[in-house]
Each structure stands twice: as C-alpha cells, then as structure tokens.
Image (spheres, rainbow, N blue to C red):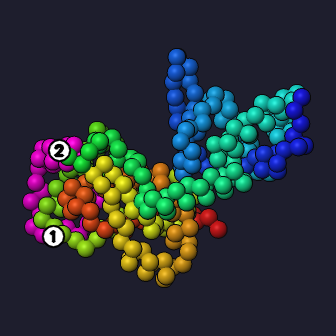
Amino acid sequence: PMSTEQLAEHLRRPHIRPFQPLGLNKDGQTFVGLRDPLMLVGQMMVVQPQALQVLQHFQGARTLDEIAADFRMPQPEQLIELARKLDEFGLLWGPTFERLEGELRTRLFQRGAFPIGASQPLGQTSAECSTTLRKWLDETEDPELETAPLGIVAPHLDYPRGWPNYAACYRALDAVEQPDRVVILGTNHFGLGDGVVMTELGFETPMGTVPPDRAVVEAMHKRFGKALLVDQLDHHAEHSIQLQLPWIQNRFGNVPVVAALVPDPLQPMVA
C-alpha cells in the first residue's frame, strides 16, 4: 500500500487550480477534459466524470487520507495517483506549477509574442485568411454610417458560427482612417488575474505578428504598477482578443495593439 506520509506537502494536501471542464466522448464512453487556462503543457488531462466529485475536495485544506476516508476508500492509492497526475499537468498549486509557469514565461519572452492560438482555424497562410475575410465582408451589408466609429463591440465566437457578427462589426470600420493603435478590451474567461491584465508581448496569427504598443503599455505600467502585468500569461490561452486580430490585420495591417483583459464588473474582486 502507498503511504501519503512521504509525499510533498502540495501533494498530500492538494489544492487544484481553476480549470475548464470539457465533455469528451470516445468509443461510446464519456470523459472530462481538464483544460488548463494557461495551457502550461501541450496536452489536456482527461479523467472519468466521477473524478470531478473528488476534485471538489482538492482545496488545499484536507489531506488525501482525510478525503479517502470520506469516500470510504480503504487505501488512498487512487487519490495519490490522481494528485501526481494533476501535478504533472501543472494543475495543482505548488512547485511544479511554478516551474512550468516560469518555463512558459521564459519561452514567450524569448519569442516576443504569444504563439498562434484561437485564430489558427481561419487559415494556414496570410493569403488564405485574407481571402476568407474578404469573402465574408463582401457578403455583409454596408452599415452606411454617417460618421466613422471610434469603436465597436464585437463577438468572440468561433469563426464558422460568428462570422456574420464579426463581419457586421468590422464593415463599420471601412470609413475609419489608419489609426496609430487599436485598443482591445477582451473578456478574461478563466485566467488568474482578477483585475485588468495587459501584456508587453505581441500576438502571432496566420497573417503575421501583431506588435504591442509598448509606449502605451509602459506608461500604463508606470502609472498603475506591476499588478497590470503580473498575470499577463492569461493572454496565452484566452481567445477573446486573439479572435479579433486577423480582422484588424486585414483592415489596418500590423497596427500596434494595446491588449487588455478585463474582469466581469458584476463579480467581486479577490482580495
């Protein structure tokens, strides 16, 4: 029998990080994928649906032995294996998560930009993306606005479902002259930051790299402090801003972007 006494404390009292559960089906069986909001590793951990009941108890206060007793498990072997696997995927708070987060941060800053994410399904090349966007825009009615808009409110749906809404929004920018920058306020669905989260990094899309507006970001950072950037890895897997970028590139080229993820104003801030 395995013993929990020799486990590291973050495994003996596991505290699971926030994750997004995704229903999966394979060979007629149902599973749950535990999607990491930061995408620290290249794969998604998959568990049986009943494991979610156990994971609710992984809150850092109770030991695996105590949890095993609640579920009337004679030995905690299954819980130990579950905790170890969660830790391997960086889904537990603790040293493994901190190491994986640091490694991701290093890779991203060496690269200077977040890699292609949610915009990938639009196409493999800039020409392919531009052809698709132009087709969608041509099929959309001109709003014939009397004055050029200063901003738009756009969806962040996947492109096959959302393109009519995207196109309706971005057709409104036809009359807009080339701007110095574009500011995007996106939804932070599952990230760690509970305030406004900006980034010093650019974004890669199939149409090229969108540069950050470093002057604006640096000025904001100087004024509001490190809290503005401390959780900037939230941008790595967040789709709300990434989905807008090809539309902006198609209209304005690689204009500098000020990207900010904002919290739900109806939810209380974490202390």
Q: CA distance from mark 2 to mark 1?
A: 22 Å
In front: mark 2 or mark 1? 2
Residue 13: x %, y % from top left: 80, 47
Residue 80 on the magenta segment: no
Residue 202: x %, y % from top left: 39, 62
The relative height of residue 13 versus residue 31 in the rendered view (above or below) is below
Q: What residue is shown at x 52% (from left), y 28% (from top)?
A: 24
Looking at the rendered structure, the kind of residue marked 2 is Thr
Q: Nearer the viewer, residue 74 or 98?
A: 98
Query: Which residue was labeled with disc 1?
Result: 177
Residue 174: x %, y % from top left: 14, 61
Looking at the rendered structure, the kind of residue marked 1 is Glu
Q: Are marks 2 and 1 in contact (CB under 8 Å)?
A: no
Image quarter in which the C terminus is found: bottom right
Left or right of residue 222: residue 14: right
Query: Which residue was labeled with disc 2?
Result: 131
Left or right of residue 54: residue 148: left
Residue 103 visible at all: yes
